[in-house]
Amino acid sequence: MKKRFWLLRVGLLGLSVALTPLIPSTAQEPPAVKSPAVPPVSDSKFFKLKDLRPGMTGVGHTVFKGDAISDFQVEILGVVDNFLPKQSAIFAKLSGGPLAETGVFAGMSGSPVFIDGKLLGAVAYSFPFSKEAIAAITPIENMVNMTDSNSSRTDKATTGNSSSSDRSPYDSSQSISQQLWSLVPSSGVNLPGAESAGRTTENGLPNPAELKPIDTPLMLSGFPRAAIDYFLPQFHAMGLAPVMGGAMGGPDVPNDTMAEASDIGPGSGVGAQLVRGIFGATAAGKVTYRDGNRIFAFGHPFLHSGPTDLPMTKTRLITVLPSLMNSTELSVPTELIGTIKQDRVSGIFGEVGVTPRMIPVTIHLRSSRNIQKTFRFETVNDRFLTPFLVNFTVFSALTSSERALGESTLEVQGTISLKGKQEVKVENFVSGDANSSVIASLSVANPVNFLLQSGLKDVQIDSITVDVTSWDEKRQAVLERIWSDRREVEAGDHAEVSAVLRRTDGEEILVRIPIIIPEQTPPGPLMVSVMDGGVLSMLESRETRPTYLPKDLSQLVRTINQARQNNRLYVRVMRPEQSFAIYGEAFPAVPPSLAALLLSDRTSGANQTTLRSSPLLTVEGPPLNLLLAGQRSITLSVVK
């Protein structure tokens, strides 16, 4: 019999990023102003668009180094109406400090511009490859209008809760385990606006004639270069410019201690934190306007995710890296000061002193060299961002310790703890010649995505714990033959099914699985099949073909936890008689009266399937440290 193996192959995306060398600044160092406790600016101190004329000059505030606020000069070029629907944009030429060399740089978003002492708006848009620092300014009126009396509410876009009309149906034409592999692409979920972001020319470079939001530098700490390269297209699609950096010597275990924030005002550095702990990911920009504890920043969307719940931090700028294509700042997050509550087209809005709700993640890794490592960090709690970030961080933890090429096996086990609900099991066994870390990280991210995208209410993830064991070898086996200790059985009898597996190195492994013939089984033939989890999943998906919605979170958790595993053999006992599947659950040996009712026009529906055979019994074999493949069947007879 020809051997059959399942080889999990996912192509790694090789990307090389050319970093422009640091060019020493020859411009005169701008005057540094110590960050003052800036009093709130009243609406009467906003500069009105109707009073703006080309040629007017003003001053902007930003940070060129450290946390000191410095000035730059602004010359108004003109106003464009309806730049966005019912919103204007102000074009201006910037100068002063290092801007002659850097142009408008990534991280400058939100830098406030004042004319005659009145706040005009935020530097927010620029042109790639521009020889001069030409920018578009978002008027401050647009930014302060992004909030209303309900701005601090928890929204379904953040938590994943929604009404039944928003819910995506569960397609049971695929098994739950098959769906968990397909819900999140190899590098994460598609985020709102990602399709239109980061448009490029045919040669892959940004369109130099396209005015676009200033790139947001995403300062990364703890992530290996290979992981950043693999996820780079997704970061670029979100308008983020990943930069390998570090942290300011803070603890690996994050905490919610709030720092004093009286020094945060227009022009100060501010960060939107996505991950914190041993891994860190913080987007950097500038504060445009402060009204008491209310902070307005960026001047353009961060991820355009609407209501959100992101940690808001101070940042410290190390230097600005000049580049012909797009200069960027190198900065690090420092102290937590509050929470970002809104991410809209005209900027982000945060509140000082408000504690964000994060999801703690712990990864325990036993490496192929028998070295124990523990990674502790937190990710944001967001319907779209959380699965992507879990995928990115788990992949990074594995890539930092394990091989990417060559024979490799990873065993993944873990739990997703839900508030007030049963834990969700995370389990997978990956073995192949390359890219095992890709599949292993998806096995954690996909259940998270499935929960948050279900649309069910009260989905609140309290924590995620993952245990990974690694071997520098391929651990696979194929099912060769099976037999039973009895050919004839009676209802209620015990029998034993034996299976022989052959490993890639030729070693044979005997597995014995006891079964009990169900009571009340009538005389006749029984089909006994032994198969791997993947084959069983496909068979079950054909039997529960219609689309249905899980009735509640408990049913969804139960469905995920019943996903078939690829390191186990399963014994399935079938009888050739009619049965039914309702809402994805099998109902074998249905009495004739109930079968007639289920087949009537009054009761049949999209959530019901009629089956030609009746699955009487499915028994799971013991877990093995092997990726299994194969299917074999025998026939038993039930006698009186």
Image (cartoon, rainbow, N blue to C red):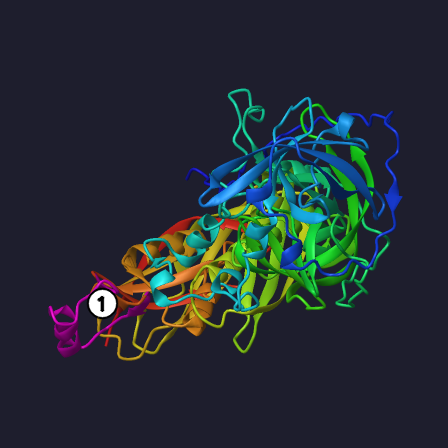
Give the amino acid at mark 1.
Ser
Q: Is residue 499 visible?
A: yes
Residue 470, horizontal then vertical, whole percent: 68, 50
Q: Is residue 33 left or right of residue 6?
A: right
Picture coordinates of residue 569 (x, y %)?
A: 47, 58
- Specify few, some or many for label 1: CA neighbours under 10 Å numbering under 14, 14-19, or 20 or more: many
Q: In the figure, is residue 590 to the left or right of 21?
A: left
Q: Residue at x 71, y 26 (%)?
A: 18
Q: Tell me where residue 278 sits by quadrant.
A: bottom right
Image quadrant containing the N terminus: top left
**Magenta stretch: includes residue 586:** yes
Residue 506 visible in rendering: no
Which quadrant of the figure has residue 50? top right
Pick the front one: 343 or 487: 343
Residue placed most toward the observer, 232 or 24: 24
Vertical arrangement, residue 582 with respect to residue 245, above or below: below
Give coordinates of residue 590: x percent, y percent: 21, 74
Q: Which residue is mark 1?
A: 579
Query: Which part of the image, by quadrant, shows the C terminus?
Result: bottom left
Q: Residue at x 50, y 65 (%)?
A: 155
Residue range corresponding to the magenta coloring: 584-610
Q: What is the residue that sits farthest to the front in this orientation?
A: 51
Q: Residue at x 57, y 54 (%)?
A: 343
Q: Height in image: 398 above or below 43? A: above
